[in-house]
Image (cartoon, grey):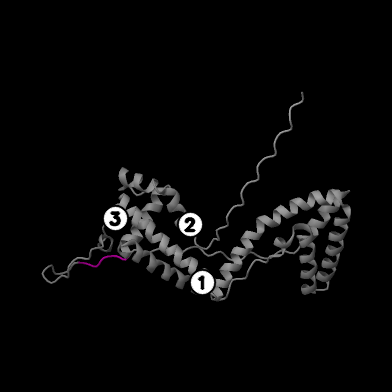
Amino acid sequence: MCITRLLVATLAALMITTPASAQFGGLKNKLKKGEGRGDQSRAAPAPADPAAQGGTVVLTADVVSQLITGLKAGKAERDAAAKEDTPYGRYKKAQLAYAEAQPKCEAGKQAFIQKAGENPKLLDKVNALNEKMIAAQSKQDYKTMEIYQDSSMLLQGGPSCVVKKPEQPKDYYEAQRAVDIRADQAAVKASGLGAGEFAMAQERAMMIMGSGAPSDVSRSEQEAVMAKKTELQQLTRTQDEPVVQAAPAKPAPAPPPAAA
């Protein structure tokens, strides 16, 4: 009977769902093509960046280190933007808070199942709130409905279950592009590479770590990249996804002493 009542409470609380906000992937770096040489006698000196002339960057251990230095600088710039008191910064902070709340909410719900089994009155409270929530919904009184829904979720999972998924600002994509430009400029400057070199080094490194390594990649390049694979993967992940630190796993309970 307790399980049946718990299912009714949970299903009613989940009747109202919030549509997922659109996810925005990171902007792809584009490599600027070199211009034709024209008249050799009047041509300007060739730029130091080989990628700007259509060349290929060789991923030595030093170049990979420079790439990592640049990626760290770019990440630091994005992190700083996410903490600024701007619509973009406030959204990013709210997005992180929501992501951190989800596993805590789920853990609270699991604990509630055990509590409800031991104390059926908890289910009575949840069911009463859910009935009021449904009644408010039928009257299209969505503000009151949300109050009852939050109260129900608070009982079932705790404060983490009432943390709302933030709504993207209207100018979010424009702000994201501006942050990407800031981060790219900081990354190139810190790396000591040219803009084209940095873009090509990042692209080649990601291809080596994936399944589409270019045919001209040497064994030494693969070794240089794979030696730093973990760090590179962390720095090249999708920037729009908030990073949530996993909670430390609880140690397993000690087995009971063996019978004498």
The answer to which of marks 3 and 1 sits earlier in the sequence is 3
Q: Name the residue at 13% across, 72% down.
A: 42
Image position, residue 199 (x, y; %): 35, 61
Q: Looking at the image, which residue is at 32% across and 43% down?
A: 219
Residue 56 falls in image quadrant: bottom left
Q: Is 198 situated above or below 135?
A: above
Q: Nearer the viewer, residue 259 or 53?
A: 259
Residue beneath disc 3: 57
Q: Is residue 222 left or right of residue 150?
A: left
Q: Helix, strand, or loop for circle 2?
A: loop
* Amino acid of disc 1: Tyr
In the rendered image, which residue does mark 1 sit on? 173
Question: Does dot 3 land on a helix, a strand or a loop?
Answer: loop
Discs 1, 2 touching: Cβ within 8 Å: no
Q: Residues within 10 Å of mark 2 (few under 14, many from 20)?
A: few
Q: Earlier in the sequence, mark 3 or mark 2?
A: 3
* Measured Cα–Cα span from mark 3 to mark 2: 22 Å
| Whole-percent x, y for residue 104 in the image | 68, 56
Q: Which residues are magenta?
A: 32-36
Residue 237 numbered tag: 2
